[in-house]
Image: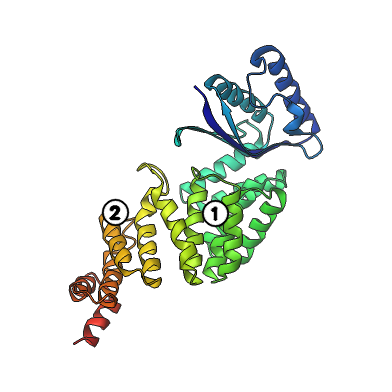
Amino acid sequence: MDFTVIVLGRLEYANSRSVQQATKVITHLLETRYKNEVLYRDVDKILDDEVCALIAPREKFQCSEKVWMNTIHMLAKASEFSIAGDLHLWRILDGKLQEYVCLEPDSDKSTVQSFRRGRQLILDGQLDEAKKLLTKAVDRFPRHAQALERRGFIHYTQGDTEAALADYAASIEIDRKRPNAYLGRARILIKQENWTAAMEDLTFSMKHSMPHHNVYLEALHRKAKCLLELGQHDKAIPLFNFFLSRPLQEDHPQYVFRRQVAFDKGRTLAAAGKLDEAISMFDEALKMPTNNGKPEMGEILLHRGLAFQQSGQSGFLEDWKKAADEGSERAAELLAEVG
């Protein structure tokens, strides 16, 4: 049975010696273990001694499970000599994700450990300590695109926009196919209401990731919202549709945003004059679980009420009353206006 396999990513090596070590090990494995049953049969096509990197451009393959396992083993061996970067591999059957593997450096080198600890501290909410460790990683290895992107995220979270933009730009300069850095910069551009520039970065983020990727779906959602802000409703709706069509499991990072996406799609449909479809979408959003209370029930009821009113249907007063009870000031104002 053959699977569809998608591979993309980049590993960085500290110097030519590390590249040569990786090349030697992989060449030996190709000759003695894999017997050509591997996706990459010519090591020189992925290991670049000149830039000290293993580069796997986004590529789709058809292969057996044995070839899949051999390829993972080979790339994992290559990662043992690397100092930064990551490789992503997806195995798909009949359109459904069967397995996802992320390979990255995991040695005891100071640069590697500083980055890994710093990244974990972000998740733990210890941003200042995380920033120190990520800075240490960058000082030791200036081409650490991941550390720069993660430090940029900390700057963004702490409100230092200028420093965040500098780190995102530096990360992109090192690795122009790193989707997270484009997404991070787009978040800032969206806050600045620079919708066109944000869409450009979001497009790059999607181009260099995959629909199974968390970063892809966030970029997709944000791009759709930019199109909504620009009044390009017919272009935004298919993006919302694609997000909502994904068979996300509850443990997927983007699962909790489905309610927000459904609400945003409803607003887009209403703005496009497709009021009945908008009402149905608001109905769907109300059935979905919230993400820490967002979007609020009152906000959805407010907009469903507006759609009812604009389409000449009854029910808008009831929705606005419920929305006002939920704390919607705009709903209370509308109720006062209609007496």
Q: Is residue 64 above or below residue 12?
A: above
Q: Which colour scheme is used?
A: rainbow
Q: Which of marks 2 and 1 is in front?
A: 2
Can you give x and y, in whole percent of width and height, for residue 176 in the image?
Answer: 68, 50
Classify mark 2: residues with Cα within 10 Å, few (<14), some (14-19) or many (20+): some
Quadrant of the snapshot with the C terminus = bottom left
- Classify residue 271 as left or right of residue 213: left
Quarter-of-image position of residue 281: bottom left
Up-down relation of residue 299 to residue 78 (above or below)? below
Q: How far apart are marks 2 and 1 (CA)?
A: 35 Å
Residue pointed to by mark 2: 288
Q: Horizontally, is 16 left or right of 216 in the view?
A: right
Q: Which amino acid does label 1 sit on?
A: Asp
Q: Which residue is drawn at 65% across and 28% down?
A: 80
In the displayed structure image, the side of residue 33 where residue 251 appears, left or right: left
Whether residue 257 can be seen here: yes
Q: Give SS at disc 1.
A: helix
Residue at 63%, 19% in the rendered image: 37
Across and down, in percent, residue 314 comes to 19, 74
Q: Is residue 150 visible?
A: no
Between 47 and 157, the one lying in front of the other is 47
Residue with the mark numbered 1: 128
* Mark linked to residue 42: none
Disc nearer the start of the sequence (2/1) = 1
Image spot of residue 162 (x, y percent): 63, 66
